[in-house]
């Protein structure tokens, strides 16, 4: 699991770098690039929150008492809502459709990274 998340982190940083390059080179696409960066950042934060929740459930399944519970799904929804509110408030700087689409891009990146990791493990390379 940790290898998949390391690969995902690298892919996310590559996507953010591509968006920054798009922002720098194509002035007409700046709002889309900023929207993608905002959505990817919110999606990445949601992934971190979800990973913490899964670890917390694992601790509970072992019978240990975890220190505290987080807000769960409400925190993840609030993060997407915050990104959308920023895009809605500043439409001249941030594209709302790009922000919404990018908020849900990170789970697909995780899926692709997991597929490649599983494929590499089955082939015996790496």
Image: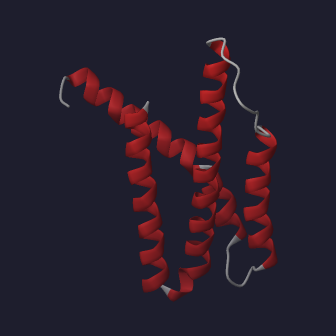
Which residue shows up at 68% across the image and 73% down it?
95
Between 27 and 69, the residue placed more toward the observer is 69
Which residue shows up at 63% across the image and 70% down it?
35
Q: Position of residue 75 (x, y in %)?
A: 77, 47
The answer to whether 47 is drawn above or below residue 92 in the figure is above
Q: Position of residue 80 (x, y in %)?
A: 74, 55
The answer to whether 92 is drawn above or below residue 61 in the figure is below
Q: Is residue 101 left or right of residue 126?
A: right
Report the quarter where the N terminus lies.
top left
Picture quadrant where residue 93 is located: bottom right
The answer to whether 124 is drawn above or below residue 17 in the figure is above
Report the quarter where the C terminus lies.
top left
Between 126 and 88, the residue placed more toward the observer is 126
Q: Position of residue 15 (x, y in %)?
A: 45, 61
The answer to whether 39 is drawn above or below residue 57 in the figure is below
Which residue shows up at 43% across the image and 59% down it?
13
Q: Position of residue 91 (x, y in %)?
A: 75, 79
């Amino acid at each position: 699991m940790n290898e998949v998340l390391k690969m995902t982190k690298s892919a996310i940083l590559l996507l953010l770098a591509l968006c920054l390059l798009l922002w720098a080179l194509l002035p007409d696409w700046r709002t889309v690039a900023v929207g993608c960066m905002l959505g990817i950042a919110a999606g990445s934060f949601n992934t971190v929150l979800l990973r913490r929740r899964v670890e917390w459930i694992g601790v509970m399944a072992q019978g240990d008492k975890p220190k505290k519970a987080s807000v769960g799904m409400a925190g993840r929804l609030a993060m997407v809502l915050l990104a959308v509110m920023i895009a809605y408030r500043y439409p001249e700087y941030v594209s709302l459709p790009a922000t919404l689409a990018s908020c849900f891009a990170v789970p697909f990146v995780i899926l692709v990274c997991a597929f490649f990791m599983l494929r590499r493990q089955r082939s015996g390379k790496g």
